[in-house]
Image (tube, rainbow, N blue to C red):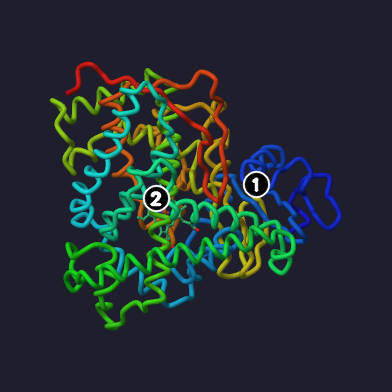
Amino acid sequence: RLDRIPHPPRRVPWLGDVLGVSVRTPVQDSMAIGRRLGPVFRRKVLGKEIVFAWGADVVADLCDESRFAKHVGLGVANLRPVAGDGLFTAYNHEPNWQLAHDILAPAFGRTAMAAYHPLMLGVARRLVERWDASERAGEAVDVPGDMTRLTLETIARTGFGHDFGSFERDRPHPFVTAMVGSLTFAQRRNVVPPPLLPLVLPRAARRNAADIAYLERTVDEVVRARRAAGVAGDGNSDGDGDLLDRMLATAHPVTGEGLSDENIRRQVITFLVAGHETTSGALSFALHYLALHPDIAARARAEADRIWPDGAEPSYEQVAKARYLRRVLDESLRLWPTAPAFSREALADTELAGGHLVRRGGWALVLTLMLHRDPAVWGDRADDFDPDRFLPEAVRARPAHVFKPFGTGARACIGRQFALHEAVLVLGLLLRRYDLHPDPGYRLRVGERLTLMPAGLTLHLTRRPDRP
Ligand code: HEM
């Protein structure tokens, strides 16, 4: 029953709820509207009514896997031309989802993760070399740019044995430029009906086709090189090869089926994009808050010094011990969940908290960004940065399903542990080596391209004198 759900008061004929909002910031605008309209609201965009939910009880219902599942809609559906039936964009009923999930899940198990650790450290060392040079030259560092270099190289190296050479370039790698282009275009497609795209955004549509072609050429080359070099293992045990080896070599343990070449291309694009873009944003927001809060940075640094004494490099097991750093990261992901929303659809007719009836197939967008700031759950100072919200006792005192940066259920993020390990490791290394100083003139601006990223964030560094 849509008519019971509030919407912004002034609707423009044809265009819908567009007053006071920008095509560049749909998620932040939705958050502002959500604050005014309450935990379930709707926005009309070009004749389409979109229902948003952020209240804890409604979201808990939407996260109930017996009644709801992932909905491939809006931005995710708009990525289908790029990622097809790859894991992130696959419809629930597509057989390649289960097949790829079963083949790739062991690549995120403990044994596999421990094998990635030294590779992650190797990439982190390259970042440190770059930051040392900036520090010596007295130059500020470009935080989102450098975090993107780091996370792209990390997923490329650990997942595909590939080196994009990001640290040797001044400008972003063309893969990143093409990816940002495709993500931005997918976001714009929410506000332009597909048949009109070539008319309304002709240059952007041509550019997008070129971006997708570039992404495909890049991954085809990565796959070709691996086939030429030889594929490791039979992919059927926990320690066997990287993501690409598994895709090329693994047959499903029960059916014996493998992934097609076309599907592998989709998965490689998916992992190269999903595997770095959101982690890069999460690291950038965390560094922003650490620079603004020297007291919190000092606590995190003291923990890192305690766990990894004498300047030694952290081992795989030690990273998991950095509980305070993990809370810093969780709190950054609470305030700015870099994947800021996800959609859920009803498996059968059902009712949501508040008495909203949903028909089978009906769907709503969970606005994670606002769920994470609900004052009823997070208190009056919900917009403030405070890692102690993630102390174990505080977490236990909150209801389930109020912190969802990695989505929910069967289609939740497969790379969660990967991202957390990488981010905690890098934050620890950076804090031990540098004091972070914010640019006094900087006010946080958040860019949107389906994902969230702090725009124009730079920091000044000084080497800590007591470090080798
Ligand atoms: C799915 C967030 C890092 C690969 C998701 C979803 C979210 C998410 C919210 C669910 C989307 C939906 O329901 O529509 C994040 C965040 C990350 C992160 C915030 C970093 C801080 C990673 C990494 C990888 C990855 C490092 C790979 C190495 C994927 C894949 C899916 C996914 C393949 C689709 C899973 C499926 O549907 O089976 N992620 N992610 N993500 N993520 Fe992540």
Quarter occupied by residue 47: bottom right
Q: Quadrant of ligand 1?
A: bottom left
**Residue 49 image point, x, y percent:** 73, 58
Residue in the image at 63% along x and 62% along y = 205
**Residue 126 image point, x, y percent:** 27, 40
For the residue pair 375 and 201, the one nearer the viewer reads as: 201
Q: Amino acid at mark 2?
A: His
- Label at residue 190: none
Q: Which residue is mark 1?
A: 26
Q: Amino acid at mark 1?
A: Pro
Q: Which residue is mark 2?
A: 276
Query: Which badge, 1 or 2, comes first in the chain's sequence?
Result: 1
Q: Is residue 411 above or below residue 255?
A: above
Would you say the beta carbon of the disc 2 residue lies within 8 angstroms of ligand 1? yes
Residue in the image at 40% along x and 63% along y = 218
For the residue pair 249 and 65, the one nearer the viewer reads as: 249
For the residue pair 271 and 123, the one nearer the viewer reads as: 123
In the image, taking residue 238 as reference, residue 99 lies left or right, namely right
In the image, taking residue 234 as reference, residue 404 lies left or right, namely right
Q: Is residue 467 visible?
A: yes
Dot 2 falls on a residue whose secondary structure is: loop
Calculate the distance from the C-alpha at mark 1 to the C-alpha at mark 2: 22 Å
**Residue 372 image point, x, y percent:** 52, 39
Q: Nearer the viewer, mark 1 or mark 2?
A: 2
